[in-house]
Image (cartoon, rainbow, N blue to C red):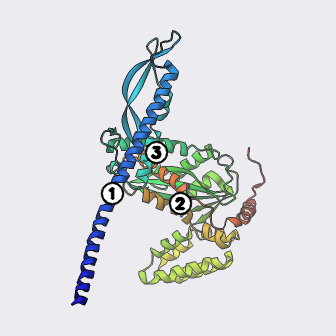
């Protein structure tokens, strides 16, 4: 009997303990929410109070102490007016002290002038939209304000207007950066599609292996005209033409022609081997693609140009009878797929420069950032979004893999170009 009573008491105790723990757990989040809201309101109230005191100090400096008339005063207090300031990614309405000169002209308080700029709001809008917040969802992404603090500037139209203004400024500044003083022995070119527009991006690699976004051109295709327009812009901004340079491209004929017409014998072209793999595979049935791709990769790994060329010509001959289009694709531009091998590169630098992968990683960043855009209203809009994405990508740039082998590349480029009769030691004015 005593034993059963003890067991019943322990069981009731566990149930009571469970009810107490459950109640505590249910109340805790609400307590935290209320505490967080109270802390935010306290910080906001104190911040606004300090700001009001700073404005009043400005008025005292301009008008002198209150209730102390002075014959030498040059300004006087003129009540308050409603003003707007940027706060927490939005505009809030506050009472703004007014000051007028003795002749009746309005004077803006220095503290208010410093805080009234819209740059912080525009920067916050750009930051939120790049993180994937839609213009409609912008207001919901901000910390709430107390009801007694009215705000504005979070509607979809306002957000879009601020985003357009900031990205237009950034685009103009980004595309006019000087290239003088940059020694760029490698330039990679690739295009990305945004709606009906093609954004052709140029990225340079300097002698230490650091990457630089050089410029962007908008067109409908990767045509010669678009590419030459991009090159003219780069040259106007300081890109040196008379310099032995390796261009890495995806194989577009327009790009190749524009490089030849602009840079002549100073340019050495490497066709992207990965693009060549894809192009050849498109002309093959499914069951033969893996074998041919493997044969191409093995040929490019043979180490010398002669061996690689011989193996590629053998492969093309094998495909001539059954798959003539694939054989023709192998032979087309064959020399330019071997350029990095001809330069004697090896290791990581060979893997880096044998394809356009270093710049295609940028295209992934662009597509991620523009994923919420459903309608492209012209090339200017596509250019703004593209440049905004490139600015974000450039912040995380690292040196290319194999950068320690750059001196070997520089020497090989000069030897290769000097064979064309060009003086690689010539100083460019």
Q: In the displayed structure, would residue 358 be above or below residue 99?
A: below
Kindly report the distance in space between the C-alpha atoms of the residues bearing marks 3 and 2.
40 Å
Q: Secondary structure at mark 1?
A: helix
Image side of residue 340 versus residue 273, left or right: right
Task: Read off the residue under disc 1.
Answer: 31
Q: Residue at x 40, y 42 (%)?
A: 44
* x then y, percent, for residue 363: 48, 60
Dot 2 or dot 1: first in sequence order is: 1
Task: Read off the residue under disc 2.
Answer: 253
| Front residue of 399 and 119 | 119
Task: Read off the residue under disc 3.
Answer: 123
Q: Secondary structure at mark 2?
A: helix
Q: Name, please, the residue furthest toward the front.
A: 2
Number of marks in the image? 3
* x then y, percent, for residue 242: 70, 51
Front of the two marks 3 and 2: 3
Query: Do callouts 3 and 2 mark residues in contact (Cβ within 8 Å)?
Result: no
* x then y, percent, for residue 390: 51, 53
Crowd around label 3: few <14 · some 14–19 · many ≥20 (10 Å)? some
Query: Do callouts 2 and 1 mark residues in contact (Cβ within 8 Å)?
Result: no
Query: In which quarter of the view is residue 403 placed?
Result: bottom right
Q: Secondary structure at mark 3?
A: helix
* x then y, percent, for residue 285: 42, 80
Q: In the displayed structure, would residue 243 be above or below residue 341?
A: above
Front of the two marks 1 and 3: 1
Q: In the displayed structure, would residue 179 be above or below residue 96?
A: below
Kindly report the distance in space between the C-alpha atoms of the residues bearing marks 2 and 1.
67 Å
């Amino acid at each position: 009997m005593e034993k059963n009573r003890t067991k019943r008491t322990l069981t009731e105790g566990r149930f009571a303990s469970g009810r107490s723990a459950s109640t505590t757990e249910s109340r805790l989040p609400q307590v935290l929410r209320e505490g967080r809201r109270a802390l935010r309101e306290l910080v906001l109230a104190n911040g606004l109070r300090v700001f009001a005191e700073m404005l009043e100090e400005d008025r005292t400096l301009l008008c002198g102490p209150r209730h102390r008339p002075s014959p030498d005063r040059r300004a006087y207090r003129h009540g308050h007016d409603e003003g707007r300031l940027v706060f927490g990614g939005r505009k809030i309405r506050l009472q703004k002290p007014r000051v007028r000169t003795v002749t009746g002209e309005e004077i803006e308080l220095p503290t208010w002038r410093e805080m009234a700029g819209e740059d912080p709001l525009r920067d916050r809008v750009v930051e939120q939209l790049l993180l994937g917040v839609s213009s409609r969802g912008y207001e919901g992404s901000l910390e709430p304000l107390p009801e007694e603090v009215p705000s504005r500037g979070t509607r979809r139209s306002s957000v879009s207007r601020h985003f357009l203004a900031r990205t237009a400024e950034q685009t103009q500044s980004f595309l006019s950066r000087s290239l003088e003083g940059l020694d760029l022995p490698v330039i990679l070119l690739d295009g990305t599609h945004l709606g009906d527009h093609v954004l052709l991006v140029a990225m340079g690699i300097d002698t230490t292996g650091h990457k630089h976004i050089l410029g962007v051109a908008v067109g409908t295709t990767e045509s010669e005209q678009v590419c030459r327009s991009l090159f003219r812009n780069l040259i106007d901004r300081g890109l040196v033409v008379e310099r032995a340079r390796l261009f890495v491209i995806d194989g577009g004929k327009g790009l190749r022609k524009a490089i030849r017409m602009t840079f002549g014998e100073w340019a050495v072209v490497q066709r992207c081997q990965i693009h060549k793999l894809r192009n050849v595979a498109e002309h093959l049935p499914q069951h033969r693609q893996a074998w041919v791709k493997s044969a191409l990769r093995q040929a490019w790994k043979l180490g010398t140009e002669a061996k690689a060329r011989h193996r590629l010509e053998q492969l093309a001959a094998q495909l001539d009878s059954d798959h003539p289009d694939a054989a023709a694709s192998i032979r087309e531009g064959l020399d330019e797929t071997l350029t990095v091998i001809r330069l004697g590169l090896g290791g990581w630098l060979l893997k880096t420069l044998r394809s356009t992968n270093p710049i295609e990683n940028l295209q992934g960043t662009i597509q991620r950032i523009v994923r919420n855009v459903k309608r492209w209203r012209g090339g200017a809009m596509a250019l703004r979004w593209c440049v905004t994405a490139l600015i974000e990508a450039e912040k995380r740039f690292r040196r290319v893999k194999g950068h320690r082998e750059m001196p070997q590349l520089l020497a090989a480029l000069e030897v290769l170009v000097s064979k064309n009769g060009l003086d690689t030691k010539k100083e460019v004015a």
